Image (cartoon, rainbow, N blue to C red):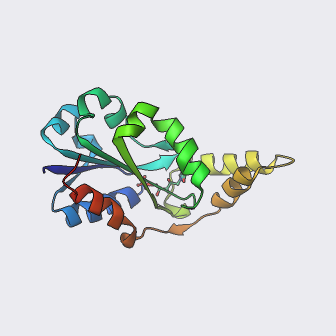
Amino acid sequence: MKTIVVYKSKYGSTKTYAEWIAKELGCEAKDAKKVKAEDLTQYDTVIYGGGLYAEVIAGVSLITKHFETLKEKKLIVFSTGLTPLDCTDYYGKMVVEKNFTPDMMERIKLYHYLGKMVVSELSLPHKAAIKGLKKLMSSKENPTEMEKLLISLCDADGDFTDKDAIGELVAYAKQDVV
Ligand SMILES: Cc1cc2nc3c(=O)[nH]c(=O)nc-3n(C[C@H](O)[C@H](O)[C@H](O)COP(=O)(O)O)c2cc1C
């Protein structure tokens, strides 16, 4: 089985996971900037990782826009983000609906990992976006649980990457079934 890990990573956490996964699988991890959809046709298993930005898995259109060409492969997508992993509504509904169609979800195995946000490293537009989001959410009279969570996530500052988290994905990628 020929496997590749492709990633898009602004601050490095998705790249870190991609490299951990690739090392476990003995395959290459490539920056999505250097990969075209047609390059992926030679692989049996395509693993794509991207950071979450406003629920969008960065760069995942490399897979979703070319789903018809890629759908017979073993397709695995992982995200990195700051939302706690036990927020099943967030990952199971919001992230899924924002990035994939139901057809895609039948073929794509999805994993989520904690990433990092080190405030001092953020670009000015990202700093402004986080500040704006916090202000907007904080102005709500009766914030929902999700909105309260978002407010608290705006104050996150740290690296939450965890190598132990990749085990399930790696085991699935190694299975000889598509
Ligand atoms: C502007 C901005 C928007 C973000 N939006 C989300 C989000 O919707 N959900 C989430 O869980 N994390 C969100 N995050 C946190 C990032 O997903 C997290 O920092 C991730 O590890 C980034 O991965 P990367 O550095 O590999 O691009 C956001 C971070 C920034 C700076």
| Residue 4 percent coordinates (x, y) | 20, 50
Going by the image, does 103 lie left or right of 123? left
> Residue at (52%, 36%) from the top-left corner?
98
Q: Residue furthest front?
A: 177
| Residue 34 percent coordinates (x, y) | 22, 42
> Residue at (27%, 34%) from the top-left corner?
71
| Residue 56 percent coordinates (x, y) | 49, 41
Observer-nearest of 151 and 177: 177
> Residue at (63%, 59%) from the top-left corner?
153
Going by the image, does 115 lie left or right of 6? right
Q: How many marks?
A: 0
Q: Is residue 169 visible?
A: yes
| Residue 108 percent coordinates (x, y) | 36, 42
Q: Quadrant of the C terminus?
A: top left
Going by the image, does 45 lie left or right of 14? left
Is the residue 142 above or below the residue 19 in the image? Answer: above
Is the residue 113 above or below the residue 1 in the image? Answer: below
Q: Residue furthest right?
A: 141
Observer-nearest of 97 and 81: 97
Observer-nearest of 113 and 109: 109
> Residue at (29%, 27%) from the top-left corner?
68
Q: Is residue 54 visible?
A: no
